[in-house]
Amino acid sequence: MNNLLSHSVMGRFYGPLLLVILVLWTFYRAILLATDSSLSLYVDEAYYWVWSQTPDFGYYSKPPMIAWSIGLVTALLGDSQLGVKSLALLVYPFTAVAFFLLARYLFDARVAFFSTLTFTTLPGVTLSSVIASTDVLLFFFWTVSLYAFVRAVNENTWRHWLLLGLAGGLGLLSKYTMGIFAISVLVALCAVQAYRQHLLNYRLYLAAVLAFILFLPNILWNIQHRFPTLQHTYEISRLENTGLHWGELGEFLAGQFSVMGPVGFFVFLALLAGAWIPRGAAAPSKGPQHTGLLLSFSLPFLLIISLQGLLGRANANWAAPTYVAATLWVISRLMQAGRTKWLVVMFAANILLGLAVFHYHTIVQVLGIELTRQTDPYKRVKGWDAFATDVTALLDAHPKTKLLSGSRSVLSHVAFYSQPHRLDGVSWNPESHVRHQFDIVTHMADHIGEDFIYVTQKTDVSDLQSRFDSVAFLKEIHIPIHSDFAITYQAYLARGFNGY
């Protein structure tokens, strides 16, 4: 009786304790971001912020949810660096809550608590939690969709089927790899015998229709703009490179140890291979065949992105949603079998890696390591605010000029860090090849006769000579980051554009 009471009290305690931890963890990361003046926005963050200034149903490389979300948080919190990054800070706690609800429904509050803590400290999640990226939104909608699916197939209620369609559609508007969720649904319905009845359930297909309707505006946007997003996806995947790329696959799989954590991914692989069987029989849990269910929502994603890596190229983070179901499966098996020491080791390793990510510069300073191109993984997110200040000074010194560049990094960072924000930058694109969003929304044909400050890394700008009345070198913009690494661009005054 005392044991039952103890479990009941603890069950009620896990939820509030998790909320307290999430609030403290979010506050800690917010303080770090607010007090670290050495880092600029990552190029994609500044790029997405520019998108957010002109809401649309699609953009060059991504569907629109990232732009809409950044627009919302910056409208509430301001167009500051912390305001942009607040997207990740605010969304991840909700992802953790959805994960907790999923785990508690499938198992119990104890498993839910420890698996949620493990998930929120995965190295991939830790790094992503301070970057305003599409992965932040994909994690959230994938987790909510999985929770809705599990409730729907077990209870067959309209509200859960509709939630599945809503979350699935919004997930597709966040990142196209959300489409793999549909494949996982099919695998789960076939793999779990108790769920097979839903293959003929019309509510499932109405949920799919709802998701499609929500996603339809982005499809229409792509049709209108000749599918630039598909073109971009194809290009970064390098699928045009024929043959099998075992090196790329190996690099991708090695990267998964940094996404799930070295201990967690090792245990995951060991459990999959059957090379390591937990001690004792796993305790029964609510609902049928959870191994089949959770592996249906982890292995397909990992295998599909692995195949993409073998055929072309795949970044380590592209398979990130794998580790929603995978983490829950691993932790539940460890806890049910009494292998809590492995759980402690996994959690400790993740915490240490997370602290290393957040306090890298302090650690290397204490160890006496010189920061260089090779030793500073943050080098590419430094100095862009100073760079933008230099470019803005040139624009101010030459009234009625606009920024001209072929670089999305230059156009995005100057737009964000200039005060007031300069959103009139134009893309230099004489080859008329769409490379980024600026090529879609700006056209030099609209600027005949105008003057520009042209910023480029090229020292030979003879291609400008015949297209402007005059072109004069202004200065080299040089922002030193380390002794062997700097941001270096050339600035030119180009007067009187005559056309390509």
Image (cartoon, grey):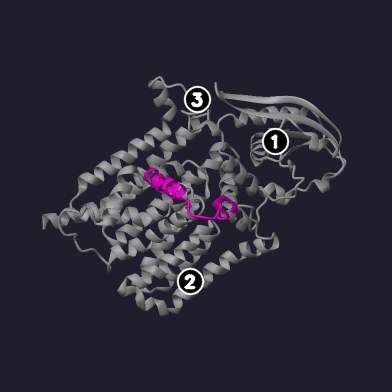
The kind of residue tagged 1 is Pro
Disc 3: CA contacts within 10 A as few (<14), some (14-19) or many (>=20): some
Q: Secondary structure at mark 2?
A: helix
Nearest to the eye among marks 2 and 3: give it.
3
CA gap between label 3 and label 1 equals 33 Å
Q: Which mark is residue 207?
A: 2
Q: Which mark is residue 372?
A: 3
- Mark 3–mark 1 CB contact (< 8 Å): no
Where residue 230 sits, quadrant-wise, is bottom right
Where is residue 461? Give x, y as percent: 77, 33
CA gap between label 2 and label 3 equals 52 Å
Counting residues from the N terminus, which is met first, the one under dot 3 or under dot 1?
Answer: 3
Magenta segment boundaries in residue numbering: 235-258
- 357 vs 463, left or right, is left
Quadrant holding the N terminus: bottom left
Q: Secondary structure at mark 3?
A: loop
The kind of residue tagged 2 is Ala
Disc 2: CA contacts within 10 A as few (<14), some (14-19) or many (>=20): many
The kind of residue tagged 3 is Thr
